Protein backbone atom coordinates (compact mmCIF):
# COMPACT_ATOMS: atom_id res chain seq x y z
CA UNK A 1 0.00 0.00 0.00
CA UNK A 2 1.39 3.38 -1.02
CA UNK A 3 1.76 5.82 1.86
CA UNK A 4 1.11 9.46 0.86
CA UNK A 5 3.78 12.07 1.60
CA UNK A 6 2.45 14.81 3.86
CA UNK A 7 1.75 18.00 1.89
CA UNK A 8 2.65 21.37 3.41
CA UNK A 9 -0.37 23.70 3.51
CA UNK A 10 -0.43 26.68 1.15
CA UNK A 11 0.42 27.27 -2.50
CA UNK A 12 4.03 28.51 -2.30
CA UNK A 13 6.30 29.05 0.72
CA UNK A 14 9.03 31.26 -0.76
CA UNK A 15 8.25 34.11 1.64
CA UNK A 16 8.32 31.75 4.64
CA UNK A 17 11.66 30.36 3.53
CA UNK A 18 13.17 33.82 3.00
CA UNK A 19 12.05 34.82 6.49
CA UNK A 20 12.94 31.62 8.38
CA UNK A 21 16.00 30.45 6.43
CA UNK A 22 17.78 27.60 8.17
CA UNK A 23 14.80 26.75 10.35
CA UNK A 24 12.10 26.63 7.68
CA UNK A 25 12.45 22.96 6.80
CA UNK A 26 12.71 21.63 10.35
CA UNK A 27 9.82 23.81 11.52
CA UNK A 28 7.60 22.34 8.84
CA UNK A 29 8.62 18.77 9.58
CA UNK A 30 8.21 19.33 13.33
CA UNK A 31 4.77 20.83 12.70
CA UNK A 32 3.61 17.69 10.90
CA UNK A 33 5.62 15.29 13.13
CA UNK A 34 7.16 13.83 9.97
CA UNK A 35 10.68 13.60 8.55
CA UNK A 36 9.34 13.72 4.98
CA UNK A 37 7.15 16.61 3.78
CA UNK A 38 6.19 18.01 0.37
CA UNK A 39 6.36 21.74 -0.22
CA UNK A 40 6.85 24.38 -2.91
CA UNK A 41 9.53 27.12 -2.91
CA UNK A 42 10.32 29.58 -5.70
CA UNK A 43 7.51 27.94 -7.68
CA UNK A 44 9.21 24.53 -7.61
CA UNK A 45 7.75 21.43 -5.98
CA UNK A 46 10.12 19.58 -3.66
CA UNK A 47 10.24 16.88 -1.01
CA UNK A 48 12.22 17.71 2.13
CA UNK A 49 13.85 14.93 4.15
CA UNK A 50 15.95 14.67 7.29
CA UNK A 51 17.61 11.93 9.35
CA UNK A 52 20.39 9.38 8.87
CA UNK A 53 18.32 7.04 6.70
CA UNK A 54 17.44 9.94 4.42
CA UNK A 55 21.15 10.82 4.19
CA UNK A 56 21.97 7.30 3.00
CA UNK A 57 19.18 7.57 0.44
CA UNK A 58 20.11 10.90 -1.15
CA UNK A 59 23.82 9.99 -1.35
CA UNK A 60 22.94 7.11 -3.70
CA UNK A 61 24.19 8.34 -7.09
CA UNK A 62 22.21 5.61 -8.85
CA UNK A 63 19.01 7.16 -7.54
CA UNK A 64 19.90 10.87 -7.51
CA UNK A 65 21.71 13.33 -9.74
CA UNK A 66 23.04 16.84 -9.19
CA UNK A 67 20.49 19.64 -9.41
CA UNK A 68 21.97 21.74 -12.23
CA UNK A 69 20.62 25.06 -10.92
CA UNK A 70 22.52 24.81 -7.62
CA UNK A 71 25.37 22.29 -8.13
CA UNK A 72 27.21 23.64 -5.06
CA UNK A 73 24.46 22.13 -2.89
CA UNK A 74 24.69 18.70 -4.49
CA UNK A 75 24.13 15.68 -2.28
CA UNK A 76 27.31 14.21 -3.80
CA UNK A 77 29.14 16.65 -1.50
CA UNK A 78 27.46 15.26 1.64
CA UNK A 79 29.75 13.79 4.25
CA UNK A 80 29.34 12.47 7.77
CA UNK A 81 31.64 12.44 10.78
CA UNK A 82 30.61 10.70 13.96
CA UNK A 83 26.93 11.08 13.15
CA UNK A 84 27.30 14.75 12.15
CA UNK A 85 26.20 15.64 8.62
CA UNK A 86 27.82 18.44 6.65
CA UNK A 87 28.44 19.66 3.13
CA UNK A 88 31.50 20.70 1.14
CA UNK A 89 34.48 18.70 2.30
CA UNK A 90 37.76 18.75 0.39
CA UNK A 91 37.85 14.95 0.68
CA UNK A 92 35.15 14.91 -1.99
CA UNK A 93 37.83 15.60 -4.58
CA UNK A 94 39.53 12.27 -3.88
CA UNK A 95 36.87 10.78 -6.14
CA UNK A 96 38.32 12.69 -9.07
CA UNK A 97 41.16 11.03 -10.96
CA UNK A 98 43.25 14.16 -11.38
CA UNK A 99 42.99 15.04 -7.71
CA UNK A 100 43.88 11.56 -6.52
CA UNK A 101 47.04 11.79 -8.63
CA UNK A 102 48.09 15.17 -7.22
CA UNK A 103 46.92 15.15 -3.60
CA UNK A 104 48.93 12.76 -1.47
CA UNK A 105 50.18 12.70 2.12
CA UNK A 106 53.00 15.06 1.18
CA UNK A 107 50.55 17.60 -0.27
CA UNK A 108 48.44 17.36 2.85
CA UNK A 109 51.48 18.14 5.00
CA UNK A 110 52.34 21.03 2.69
CA UNK A 111 48.83 22.43 3.12
CA UNK A 112 49.14 22.30 6.90
CA UNK A 113 52.55 24.01 6.73
CA UNK A 114 51.13 26.82 4.59
CA UNK A 115 48.28 27.38 7.04
CA UNK A 116 50.67 27.51 9.97
CA UNK A 117 52.90 30.02 8.16
CA UNK A 118 49.96 32.28 7.38
CA UNK A 119 48.76 32.13 10.99
CA UNK A 120 52.22 33.03 12.31
CA UNK A 121 52.36 36.01 9.94
CA UNK A 122 48.95 37.29 11.02
CA UNK A 123 49.69 36.95 14.70
CA UNK A 124 52.83 39.01 14.25
CA UNK A 125 50.82 41.63 12.37
CA UNK A 126 48.21 41.74 15.15
CA UNK A 127 50.90 42.67 17.65
CA UNK A 128 51.27 46.05 15.95
CA UNK A 129 47.65 46.42 14.85
CA UNK A 130 45.66 44.62 17.57
CA UNK A 131 42.15 45.79 16.64
CA UNK A 132 40.87 43.37 14.03
CA UNK A 133 37.77 42.32 12.15
CA UNK A 134 38.17 38.58 12.73
CA UNK A 135 35.86 37.34 9.96
CA UNK A 136 37.59 39.51 7.35
CA UNK A 137 40.99 38.32 8.60
CA UNK A 138 40.04 34.65 8.27
CA UNK A 139 38.52 35.20 4.84
CA UNK A 140 41.74 36.79 3.63
CA UNK A 141 43.95 34.15 5.25
CA UNK A 142 41.96 31.38 3.61
CA UNK A 143 42.20 32.95 0.16
CA UNK A 144 45.98 33.34 0.55
CA UNK A 145 46.30 29.74 1.76
CA UNK A 146 44.31 28.20 -1.09
CA UNK A 147 46.17 30.26 -3.71
CA UNK A 148 49.57 29.37 -2.18
CA UNK A 149 48.61 25.71 -2.01
CA UNK A 150 47.23 25.49 -5.55
CA UNK A 151 50.13 27.50 -6.96
CA UNK A 152 47.99 30.46 -8.08
CA UNK A 153 50.05 33.68 -8.06
CA UNK A 154 48.28 36.46 -6.18
CA UNK A 155 49.60 40.00 -5.79
CA UNK A 156 49.25 42.00 -2.60
CA UNK A 157 47.68 44.83 -4.63
CA UNK A 158 44.94 42.47 -5.85
CA UNK A 159 44.41 40.52 -2.63
CA UNK A 160 41.46 42.56 -1.34
CA UNK A 161 39.56 42.39 -4.64
CA UNK A 162 40.28 38.67 -5.09
CA UNK A 163 39.12 37.99 -1.53
CA UNK A 164 35.92 39.99 -2.06
CA UNK A 165 35.16 38.21 -5.34
CA UNK A 166 35.86 34.73 -4.00
CA UNK A 167 33.69 35.24 -0.93
CA UNK A 168 30.92 36.79 -3.03
CA UNK A 169 31.10 33.66 -5.16
CA UNK A 170 31.03 31.44 -2.06
CA UNK A 171 27.90 33.19 -0.74
CA UNK A 172 25.05 31.20 -2.28
CA UNK A 173 22.02 32.80 -0.76
CA UNK A 174 20.77 35.72 1.32
CA UNK A 175 17.47 37.05 2.60
CA UNK A 176 17.04 38.74 -0.78
CA UNK A 177 17.07 35.41 -2.60
CA UNK A 178 19.71 33.90 -4.80
CA UNK A 179 22.17 36.72 -5.43
CA UNK A 180 22.59 35.78 -9.05
CA UNK A 181 23.78 39.14 -10.39
CA UNK A 182 26.42 39.94 -7.73
CA UNK A 183 27.54 36.36 -7.56
CA UNK A 184 27.75 36.00 -11.34
CA UNK A 185 29.75 39.22 -11.64
CA UNK A 186 32.24 37.94 -9.04
CA UNK A 187 32.43 34.54 -10.73
CA UNK A 188 33.05 36.14 -14.13
CA UNK A 189 35.98 38.13 -12.75
CA UNK A 190 37.48 35.03 -11.11
CA UNK A 191 37.03 32.98 -14.30
CA UNK A 192 38.71 35.63 -16.46
CA UNK A 193 41.61 35.73 -13.99
CA UNK A 194 42.03 31.94 -14.03
CA UNK A 195 41.61 31.63 -17.82
CA UNK A 196 44.30 34.26 -18.37
CA UNK A 197 46.60 32.53 -15.88
CA UNK A 198 46.18 29.08 -17.46
CA UNK A 199 46.79 30.45 -20.95
CA UNK A 200 49.92 32.23 -19.76
CA UNK A 201 51.08 29.06 -18.02
CA UNK A 202 50.58 26.89 -21.11
CA UNK A 203 52.32 29.50 -23.27
CA UNK A 204 55.32 29.51 -20.94
CA UNK A 205 54.86 33.17 -20.01
CA UNK A 206 54.35 32.54 -16.30
CA UNK A 207 56.32 30.20 -14.07
CA UNK A 208 54.46 27.91 -11.65
CA UNK A 209 55.93 25.16 -9.48
CA UNK A 210 55.42 21.93 -11.40
CA UNK A 211 54.41 20.16 -8.19
CA UNK A 212 51.51 22.55 -7.57
CA UNK A 213 47.94 21.53 -8.38
CA UNK A 214 47.48 24.43 -10.81
CA UNK A 215 50.37 23.18 -12.96
CA UNK A 216 49.38 19.51 -12.81
CA UNK A 217 45.71 20.21 -13.56
CA UNK A 218 46.56 22.61 -16.41
CA UNK A 219 48.55 19.85 -18.11
CA UNK A 220 46.40 16.90 -17.03
CA UNK A 221 45.49 14.54 -19.88
CA UNK A 222 42.15 12.77 -20.19
CA UNK A 223 41.79 9.10 -21.12
CA UNK A 224 42.23 9.93 -24.80
CA UNK A 225 45.55 11.65 -24.13
CA UNK A 226 44.24 15.18 -24.66
CA UNK A 227 44.95 17.92 -22.13
CA UNK A 228 41.83 19.20 -20.42
CA UNK A 229 40.04 22.18 -22.01
CA UNK A 230 40.71 25.45 -20.20
CA UNK A 231 37.00 25.70 -19.32
CA UNK A 232 37.15 22.32 -17.55
CA UNK A 233 40.32 23.28 -15.66
CA UNK A 234 38.69 26.53 -14.51
CA UNK A 235 35.52 24.75 -13.38
CA UNK A 236 37.54 22.27 -11.32
CA UNK A 237 39.60 25.07 -9.76
CA UNK A 238 36.48 27.09 -8.97
CA UNK A 239 34.80 24.19 -7.19
CA UNK A 240 37.98 23.43 -5.25
CA UNK A 241 38.46 27.09 -4.26
CA UNK A 242 34.80 27.45 -3.25
CA UNK A 243 34.87 24.24 -1.20
CA UNK A 244 38.13 25.17 0.52
CA UNK A 245 37.19 28.77 1.27
CA UNK A 246 33.75 27.78 2.56
CA UNK A 247 35.47 25.47 5.05
CA UNK A 248 37.11 28.57 6.53
CA UNK A 249 33.72 29.44 8.02
CA UNK A 250 34.25 26.59 10.47
CA UNK A 251 37.24 28.52 11.85
CA UNK A 252 35.02 31.57 12.31
CA UNK A 253 32.49 29.47 14.19
CA UNK A 254 35.21 27.80 16.25
CA UNK A 255 36.23 31.27 17.43
CA UNK A 256 32.61 32.20 18.07
CA UNK A 257 32.14 29.01 20.12
CA UNK A 258 35.22 29.88 22.20
CA UNK A 259 33.92 33.40 22.81
CA UNK A 260 30.49 32.11 23.83
CA UNK A 261 31.90 29.24 25.93
CA UNK A 262 35.12 30.61 27.48
CA UNK A 263 35.07 27.95 30.21
CA UNK A 264 36.07 25.34 27.59
CA UNK A 265 39.38 26.93 26.64
CA UNK A 266 41.53 25.52 29.46
CA UNK A 267 40.25 22.00 28.88
CA UNK A 268 40.83 22.27 25.13
CA UNK A 269 44.43 23.38 25.71
CA UNK A 270 45.09 20.24 27.75
CA UNK A 271 43.06 17.51 26.04
CA UNK A 272 43.40 16.64 22.33
CA UNK A 273 40.52 14.18 22.52
CA UNK A 274 38.29 16.98 23.71
CA UNK A 275 39.54 19.14 20.83
CA UNK A 276 38.14 16.49 18.49
CA UNK A 277 34.82 16.56 20.34
CA UNK A 278 34.76 20.37 20.20
CA UNK A 279 35.29 20.43 16.43
CA UNK A 280 32.53 17.88 15.85
CA UNK A 281 30.18 19.96 18.00
CA UNK A 282 31.08 23.12 16.07
CA UNK A 283 30.16 21.34 12.83
CA UNK A 284 26.93 19.98 14.33
CA UNK A 285 25.82 23.16 16.07
CA UNK A 286 26.80 25.75 13.44
CA UNK A 287 25.62 24.42 10.08
CA UNK A 288 27.26 26.71 7.54
CA UNK A 289 25.23 24.99 4.79
CA UNK A 290 21.75 24.02 6.06
CA UNK A 291 20.61 21.76 3.22
CA UNK A 292 21.59 19.94 0.04
CA UNK A 293 19.57 19.37 -3.12
CA UNK A 294 19.31 16.57 -5.66
CA UNK A 295 16.91 15.29 -8.31
CA UNK A 296 15.64 11.72 -8.65
CA UNK A 297 16.85 9.82 -11.70
CA UNK A 298 14.04 7.28 -11.66
CA UNK A 299 10.74 6.50 -10.02
CA UNK A 300 11.07 4.47 -6.81
CA UNK A 301 9.46 3.62 -3.48
CA UNK A 302 11.07 4.44 -0.16
CA UNK A 303 9.38 3.68 3.16
CA UNK A 304 6.24 2.85 1.15
CA UNK A 305 6.20 6.38 -0.32
CA UNK A 306 6.40 7.03 -4.04
CA UNK A 307 9.10 9.32 -5.45
CA UNK A 308 8.54 10.34 -9.07
CA UNK A 309 11.32 10.69 -11.64
CA UNK A 310 12.85 14.22 -11.74
CA UNK A 311 11.49 14.94 -8.27
CA UNK A 312 13.47 17.68 -6.51
CA UNK A 313 14.57 16.44 -3.08
CA UNK A 314 16.03 18.59 -0.31
CA UNK A 315 18.01 17.01 2.53
CA UNK A 316 17.82 19.08 5.73
CA UNK A 317 21.37 19.05 7.13
CA UNK A 318 20.67 21.53 9.92
CA UNK A 319 17.51 19.66 10.93
CA UNK A 320 19.33 16.32 10.97
CA UNK A 321 22.08 17.78 13.18
CA UNK A 322 19.45 19.22 15.56
CA UNK A 323 16.95 16.37 15.53
CA UNK A 324 15.59 15.85 19.05
CA UNK A 325 15.18 12.12 18.48
CA UNK A 326 18.92 11.74 17.86
CA UNK A 327 20.56 14.46 19.93
CA UNK A 328 20.06 15.25 23.62
CA UNK A 329 19.37 18.98 24.07
CA UNK A 330 20.32 19.75 20.45
CA UNK A 331 19.90 23.52 20.94
CA UNK A 332 22.82 23.57 23.42
CA UNK A 333 26.53 23.62 22.53
CA UNK A 334 27.89 20.53 24.32
CA UNK A 335 31.14 18.93 23.05
CA UNK A 336 30.83 16.34 25.81
CA UNK A 337 28.12 14.59 23.82
CA UNK A 338 30.87 12.99 21.70
CA UNK A 339 33.07 11.75 24.55
CA UNK A 340 31.51 8.29 24.72
CA UNK A 341 31.61 7.74 20.98
CA UNK A 342 33.47 4.70 19.73
CA UNK A 343 35.19 7.00 17.24
CA UNK A 344 37.11 8.80 19.96
CA UNK A 345 40.05 6.45 19.61
CA UNK A 346 43.60 7.47 18.71
CA UNK A 347 43.22 5.70 15.38
CA UNK A 348 40.08 7.67 14.52
CA UNK A 349 41.60 11.01 15.52
CA UNK A 350 44.75 10.28 13.51
CA UNK A 351 42.65 9.65 10.39
CA UNK A 352 40.90 13.02 10.36
CA UNK A 353 39.46 14.28 7.12
CA UNK A 354 41.23 17.19 5.46
CA UNK A 355 38.59 19.60 6.74
CA UNK A 356 38.93 18.41 10.34
CA UNK A 357 42.70 18.75 10.04
CA UNK A 358 42.38 22.36 8.83
CA UNK A 359 40.05 23.30 11.67
CA UNK A 360 42.28 21.60 14.23
CA UNK A 361 45.39 23.48 13.07
CA UNK A 362 43.58 26.83 13.18
CA UNK A 363 42.03 26.02 16.54
CA UNK A 364 45.50 25.43 17.98
CA UNK A 365 46.31 29.07 17.17
CA UNK A 366 43.00 30.36 18.51
CA UNK A 367 43.73 28.59 21.79
CA UNK A 368 47.19 30.20 22.01
CA UNK A 369 45.85 33.73 21.69
CA UNK A 370 43.97 35.96 24.10
CA UNK A 371 41.35 38.51 23.11
CA UNK A 372 39.55 41.49 24.52
CA UNK A 373 36.00 41.29 23.17
CA UNK A 374 34.23 44.66 22.74
CA UNK A 375 30.50 44.69 23.34
CA UNK A 376 28.84 43.73 20.06
CA UNK A 377 26.17 41.64 18.40
CA UNK A 378 27.44 38.19 17.48
CA UNK A 379 24.26 36.77 15.97
CA UNK A 380 24.27 34.92 12.66
CA UNK A 381 21.44 35.57 10.19
CA UNK A 382 19.65 32.30 9.43
CA UNK A 383 18.88 33.66 5.96
CA UNK A 384 22.54 33.81 4.85
CA UNK A 385 24.02 30.69 3.22
CA UNK A 386 26.79 29.91 4.04
CA UNK A 387 26.20 31.42 7.46
CA UNK A 388 28.51 33.91 9.13
CA UNK A 389 28.17 36.49 11.94
CA UNK A 390 25.99 39.37 10.74
CA UNK A 391 28.37 42.16 11.75
CA UNK A 392 31.57 40.13 11.80
CA UNK A 393 33.53 39.68 15.03
CA UNK A 394 35.49 42.67 16.34
CA UNK A 395 38.37 41.69 18.61
CA UNK A 396 41.31 43.30 20.36
CA UNK A 397 44.36 41.07 20.20
CA UNK A 398 45.94 40.84 23.65
CA UNK A 399 49.69 40.20 23.69
CA UNK A 400 51.65 40.69 26.93
CA UNK A 401 55.05 41.35 25.32
CA UNK A 402 53.47 43.92 23.04
CA UNK A 403 51.64 45.65 25.88
CA UNK A 404 54.82 45.89 27.97
CA UNK A 405 56.51 47.82 25.16
CA UNK A 406 53.82 50.50 25.06
Image (tube, rainbow, N blue to C red):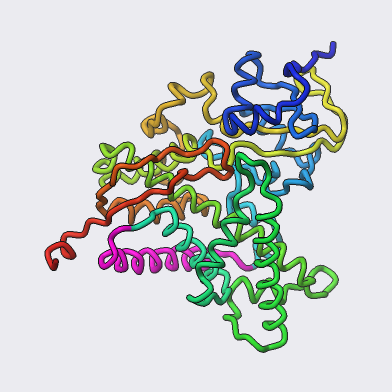
Say if the magenta span includes residue 177.
no
Relative image position of residue 66 (x, y in whole percent): 77, 45
Q: Quadrant of residue 311?
A: top right
Residue 53 showing in the rendered view: no
Relative image position of residue 273 (x, y in whole percent): 35, 42
Q: Residue at x 67, y 48 (%)?
A: 179
Q: The C terminus is located in which quarter?
A: bottom left
Relative image position of residue 229 (x, y in whole percent): 79, 71
> Which SS does the magenta portion mostly show?
helix
Q: Is residue 300 left or right of residue 340?
A: right
Q: Residue at x 64, y 76 (%)?
A: 215
Residue sitting farthest toward the top:
1
Residue numbers of the magenta segment: 102-131
Which residue is at the front of the view, 403 or 321?
403
Which residue is at the front of the view, 383 or 355?
383
Residue sitting farthest toward the left:
404
Q: The N terminus is located in which quarter?
A: top right
Which residue is at the front of the view, 351 or 10?
10
Q: Is residue 264 left or right of residue 389?
A: left
Relative image position of residue 10 (x, y in whole percent): 75, 19
Q: Residue at x 53, y 19 (%)?
A: 325
Query: From what the image shows, is residue 42 above or below residue 202?
Result: above
Q: Quadrant of residue 62?
A: top right
Query: From what the image shows, is residue 334 above or below residue 150?
Result: above
Amino acid sequence: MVKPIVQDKGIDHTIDFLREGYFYFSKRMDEYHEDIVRSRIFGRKLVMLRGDEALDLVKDTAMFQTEKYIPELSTSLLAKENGVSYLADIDYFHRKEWFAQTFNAEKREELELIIRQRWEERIEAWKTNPSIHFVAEIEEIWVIVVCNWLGIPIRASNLKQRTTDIHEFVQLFSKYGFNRWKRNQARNRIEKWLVFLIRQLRAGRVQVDEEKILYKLSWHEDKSGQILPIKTVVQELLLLIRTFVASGRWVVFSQLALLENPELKERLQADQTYVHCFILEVIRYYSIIPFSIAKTQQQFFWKDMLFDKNQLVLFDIHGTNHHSEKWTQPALFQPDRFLDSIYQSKKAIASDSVMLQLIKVSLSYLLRTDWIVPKQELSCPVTEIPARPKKGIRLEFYHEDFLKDI
